[in-house]
Image (spheres, grey):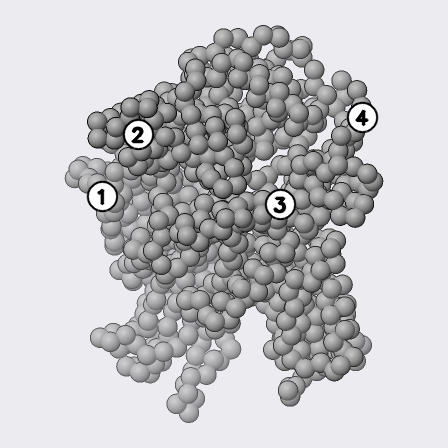
Amino acid sequence: MSQARNLIDETGKRIDGRGFDELRNVKITVGPVKNADGSAFIEFGKNKILAAVYGPREVHPKHMALPDRCVLRCRYHMSPFSTDTRKNPAPSRREVEISKVMREALEPALMLQDYPRAAIDVYVEVLQSDGGSRCAGITAASVALADAGISMHDLVASCAAGKVDNKIVLDINDEEDKEGQADMPVAYMPRLEQVTLLQLDGRLAPEQFNECLDKAIGGCKMVYEIQKQALMQKYFGNETELKEETQ
Amino acid sequence: MSSSKRSTIIVEHLRKQQMWDALSRGKRLDGRDFSETRQLVIETDIIKKANGSARVKLGDTEVIAGVKVETGEPFEGLENKGALILSAEVLPTASPYIEPGPPDEEVVELARVVDRGVRESEMIDLEKLVLVPGKIVYTIFVDCSILNADGNLFDATSYATVAALLTAKLPIFEMQDQKVVDSGNTQPMPVTSMPVSITAARIGDHVLIDPSAEEEACMDSRITITTTDEGFCATQKGHTGSFMPDQIKKAAEAATIKGKEVRARLKELLVNNG
Amino acid sequence: MHEIKRRYVIPGDKIVEGNFRPLMNVIKSGNALIATRIGIAETGRDGVKVIPLSGVYLPRVNDLVIGKIADHSSLSWEVDINSCFSAHLPAQDVFGRDFSPARDDMTKHFAIGDMITARIVAFDRTRDPMLTVQDRDLGKIPRGELLRISATRVPRLIGKRGSMIQTIEQATQTRVLIGQNGIVVVTGRSPEGVNLAVMAIRMVEDEAHTANLTQRIKGLLNVPDTPPPQERSPLSAGAPKPAEIESTIDEVEEELEVEGEK
């Protein structure tokens, strides 16, 4: 892959001014969609993504229901105005694949056996895209699932790492994704220490694979803290301790 | 994909009775008067990747419209005009009754009615959007995503569309060696008027402006009337019931008065936008 | 009286370590007890549980629910009970064993859109909830102001031994019918009283996780801060009889001891 320009300058700063181990700004708002059972809005760099959860609810058509567990359905979709050139609103092959890996990234966290014969629908809508929209989408979806009160083993946090100018860096943005050498999106359940999504796009040297994976997991842990904070803030405000009732 | 899913809200009889009782006292369930609209919030330029964008909240109904400008061939028969293409999607996030998939007839109607308002008012001077007459013109896409649906998608989508178009920055394309080149500069959209739709629902003998989802589930019929400063430009009667001529005339009067108020809000955007 | 420790949790949070029994919305992972939902974790002598603050209603046998007639076949009504499962009310439950679909007009009893109070008689992992209206004060709800709250807030709205709901009812001169599934119907003679009761219920819903809520509700309703009278006054038609309320509350009490209200 030929590079038109340097993505890392002499002082070790990336094109958006970040260091190698720095996340972009991440902000999560819990519960913005009134009609949904659970929802979250995430701004992850320039990504603006809405996730909404409906369920557990009845499965239609009925034959899709499973006798012993809940069906999880996911849709990842990009709005036509979310990209540089207008995106056709019909689902692309890329969106179909991301919907699938997203579902498989979330499913290990959910206690689906608690809701036999029901369905949970997760809708992720990218309103403005930047690099790492699937990671941001998974992160938001996981918060929306918790907001919906679905039983979960852990939250799923997601972040990518990648290779830019031969360096392994955290949280690849749009330019780095397009012009860099590799992108590795990872989703992770920090408490259980389990990876639930792993993809790699690009070339890494043998010793760089582990470095990249570890860096992405480190990013997931940072994202996890932001998720937890957003949920605590929504449900308990600034109180962290439950004060006992005084009689 | 066909599905046995119930696609409409069944309003409880208790709730209907409450609504009728309230209406007979001249009030609506959410406390509004018949001609009162819900709170309207308009934000613009929220999607940096679009040439223009707006988020509109009308009560709990929430719509984002994004404008994307490209070049392409003109429509047949309209060789000397730019092309305007408007689409709408009610996202599955918007309500428990929506399923993902291609737009159903109600959403197609929604997009067409909003489109008609913009087109018939000649809001955008499309003749100014021609690069090579008969061959290459500007193509303006307006895509509307409904994020949360709580009734009156028509007006919320109409306001989002107009707000996004008003504040859009039109990239200036040039022809160099028979190729289209983006000059890197922008100019305001060639706007000539401001269409604003006002929708009313009839429940029994009562005509209510800006119906909520619950009111729409109880309504007999619906009417959308679009006005500009000059007068009327588009109308659509919807739903299974009918209207008496006097009710329509009242709705038209309300559309004129309320439309002016909304237009004043939209004009503010233009001032703030420079 | 043993001591109960409480704290706010979200899924994945470690509540405590040690030899405790996981009760509700808690899993054991090694020696740690982990929350699986957002809510208030309670660690007591008998185990650890999380009282959830969000989530849809999951049916339980014997729950008193308020449902909406959504559809009917020739043999049963389908009832929307605000859950992931539609409930069924067999026509025989209403017409008796000699019910005949050809002769009996089901819509005369319950039409689509009608609200009913019912009890869940059967439900498990393999089948949808089955309802009955054959008990005193069950059946169609003729009037009232309808509101929906999260089912997770129902125990808080009832309060210990019904203290919260009694406070609201007495201060506003209303009757409040509460389904375990989060559907609430308020009736009263004056619209002002009903409006005030609805405001109070909304406040309970919004602030269910906070302490001293009863005091604040009393403030809203202008009630002097004295213990509510012991007897729940007679109920209007359509409301469950006192014995039922009590049984519901007992269950709730086991579930909810968020506060040491009197």
Residue bearing the label numbered 1:
B240
Q: Is residue C203 above or below residue B77?
A: above
Look at label 1 and name its amino acid. Thr
Neighbor class of circle 4 (other Cα within 10 Å; few <14, some 14-19, many 20+) is few
* Disc 4 to disc 2, C-alpha distance: 51 Å
Q: Is residue B15 visible?
A: no
The residue tagged 3 is A151
Mark identifier at residue C3: 4
At horizontal 36% and vertical 59% (from top left) the residue drawn is: B1
Would you say B74 lies left or right of C211 here?
left
Give residue C39's quadrant in the image. top right
Tag nearer the camera, 3 or 1:
3
- Residues beneath discs 3 and 1 located on the same chain: no
Q: Mark 4: which secondary structure? A: loop
Q: Is residue A95 left or right of residue B177?
A: right
Return the x and y of residue A246 as percentages of the image width and height. Answer: 76, 21
SS type, badge 1? loop
Expressed as whole percent of the image width and height from the top left, the position of residue B208 reads 31, 36
Query: What element does badge 2 sit on?
Result: loop
Observer-nearest residue: B11 or A189?
Answer: A189
Marks 2 and 3, how far apart in space?
Answer: 36 Å
- Whether labels 3 and 4 share one chain: no
In space, the residues marked 3 and 1 are separated at their CA atoms by 43 Å
Whole-number angstrom distance, CA of label 2 to CA of label 1: 21 Å
> Circle 3: is it few (<14), some (14-19), or many (20+) Cα within 10 Å?
many
Residue sitting farthest toward the bottom? B177
Q: Are marks 1 and 4 on the same chain?
A: no
